[in-house]
Amino acid sequence: MNLRYLKPLIVIGLVLGVFAVLFSLFYGGTSDSEPISSDKIPDTIEDAGFVHSGEALRLEILGGSTVRYLVGEQLARRDLPNDAIGVTGQVEGLIVLDGSGAIDQENSEIVVMLESLQSDEPRRDNYLRTRTSIGSPEFPKAVFIPQEVSGLDWPIGEGDRLIFDMVGQMTIRGVTNPMTWSVEALWDQGVITGQAKTSIYFSDYQIPKPTLLFILSMDDEIRLEADLLMGVSRR
């Protein structure tokens, strides 16, 4: 073979050989373990994976968290009752826990943007904004101020299943009332994932019940659920 053509082939072979060695050094030996999904890695949390020994913690709500309401209703076009469900992914905030596990009320707040609430029925969504003012420019958000946790074992650690109640003050439509959320969560890979549930009544926040032709009846109770992703870091 002409040396003019052989030399480039030799160079290419050497480059591929070096690449193969580097690849095996950095990625070899991992075939027996499952790769960590990139969407589970909290790249915004500098202290992800640290061992908690009782110091103050900062829990920040991450993207992917959602809040929804559920109300039992009977529709004219259906034979059986069903739940009206409205969902928003616009939720943000912080929960700061001090060294004893108590909530730092001055620095803790969760905000839900009600203007982005959406159900499967545009007429219902429009009624909320125009007739109840929920999600309107006048009352665009709901604000929860955490005040106390009960039943939380402290300190918490990676792999712990967290079951506790969180008590605070919820403001909707300019009305503030006490509210208790029941929380079940898991701390894994620097992120707490879990669900919180509570319930209110229309009258608690002076919310007019929808009176639409396609809704025959509606429950007085409104169930609230939050699916939360929270990054964990030292305060």
Image (tube, rainbow, N blue to C red):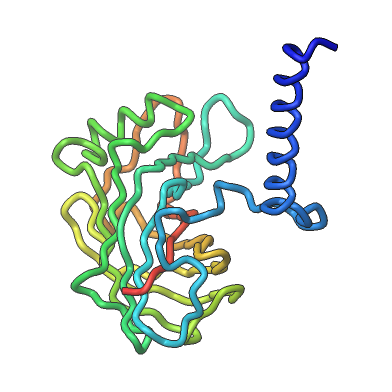
Residue 105 as seen in the image, left or right of residue 153: left
Q: Nearer the viewer, residue 19 or 26?
A: 19
Residue 39 as seen in the image, left or right of residue 136: right
Quadrant for the C terminus, please.
Answer: bottom left
Residue 64: tell me if it is visible.
yes
Position of 2 relative to 63 (above/below): above
Q: Nearer the viewer, residue 194 or 80?
A: 194
| Image position, residue 96 (x, y; %) | 31, 72
| Image position, residue 228 (x, y; %) | 46, 56
Determine the residue positioned at 52% across, 27% down: 76
Residue 223: tell me if it is visible.
no
| Image position, residue 185 (x, y; %) | 54, 67
Q: Nearer the viewer, residue 141 or 126?
A: 141
Position of 116 relative to 223 (above/below): above
Quadrant for the N terminus, please.
Answer: top right
Determine the residue positioned at 40% across, 54% down: 44
| Image position, residue 227 (x, y; %) | 49, 54
Determine the residue positioned at 50% across, 79% down: 51
Q: Residue furthest right?
A: 1
Counting every numbered tag in the picture gives 0
Residue 80 as seen in the image, left or right of residue 214: right
Q: Nearer the viewer, residue 129 or 208?
A: 129
Determine the residue positioned at 24% across, 39% down: 132
Q: Residue furthest front?
A: 3
